[in-house]
Image (tube, rainbow, N blue to C red):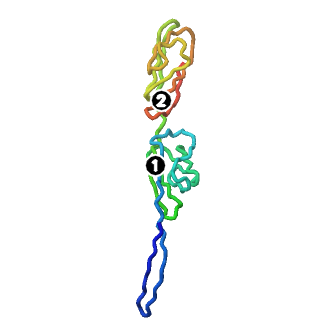
Amino acid sequence: GSFSINYTYPDPCVLQDDATISVEVAPNLTLELPEDVCVDALPFSLVSSPTDGIFSGLGITDPLLGTFDAAIAGEGTHTISMTTSTVCPINLTDDINVQPLPILDVSANADVCPGDDVMIQAEGAESYLWTPATYLSADNIDAPFVSLEATTTYTVEGTSEFGCTSQGQVT
């Protein structure tokens, strides 16, 4: 709101004047960052209100749009700041965690004969999806059995607890 004040300056002459002071209401501010992103995520725009702030921090590639690139930031926890361009600038900060891709170790028994069942195995992730599913005992476990009918290359996609994925193969 606006407020009127009267002031007097007493030395050496008495001076008196009136002034009006306007006090602005602070805007409702938010900075919404995802808690976790994968290091291979495509660059994306961060969300803030108001939308006319300036973003800063490791991984920010466009300070005006708030574009964040996880590959540039690298793995780890990064503090992102947004400073409003309002009459009274306000600085908001939050952390974003850039998560690594799972490192898969994929293996199979080396010496098998046609018609034998062999176990293929992947380690290093929380969940797995094997393709093709042909001849597999299950396609969504870490160590399915394969009923060998012909030489086949299997691809496994491993997903971490943060949703980050990587692939490996075994023949």
In the image, residue 61 sits, relative to residue 134, either above or below, namely below
Specify the amino acid type for callout 2.
Thr
Q: Which residue has dot 2 on it?
A: 159
Taking the view exactly as shown, the residue that stands out farthest to the left is 10
Q: Position of residue 94 (x, y in %)?
A: 44, 50
Specify the amino acid type for callout 1.
His
Q: Mark 2 falls on what kind of element?
A: strand
Quarter-of-image position of residue 7: bottom left
Q: Residues within 10 Å of mark 2 (few under 14, many from 20)?
A: many
Residue nearer the viewer, 135 or 83: 83
Q: Which residue has dot 1 on it?
A: 78
C-alpha gap between disc 2 and disc 1: 23 Å
Residue nearer the viewer, 71 or 91: 91
In the image, residue 91 sits, relative to residue 167, either above or below, namely below
Quadrant in the picture for the C terminus = top right
In the image, residue 106 sits, relative to residue 81, either above or below, namely above
- The answer to the question of whether label 2 and label 1 lie on touching residues, with beta carbons closer than 8 A, is no
Taking the view exactly as shown, the residue that stands out farthest to the bottom is 12
| Residue at figure coordinates x 51%, y 50% from the top left | 48
Taking the view exactly as shown, the residue that stands out farthest to the top is 115
| Residue at figure coordinates x 56%, y 48% from the top left | 67
Q: Position of residue 53 (x, y in %)?
A: 54, 56
Relative side of 44 to 122, left or right:
right
| Residue at figure coordinates x 50%, y 38% from the top left | 38
Q: Residues within 10 Å of mark 1 (few under 14, many from 20)?
A: some
Q: Position of residue 50 (x, y in %)?
A: 52, 54
Q: Mark 1 falls on what kind of element?
A: strand
Comes first in the chain, label 2 or label 1: 1
Q: Position of residue 132 (x, y in %)?
A: 56, 17
Tell me how many marks there are: 2
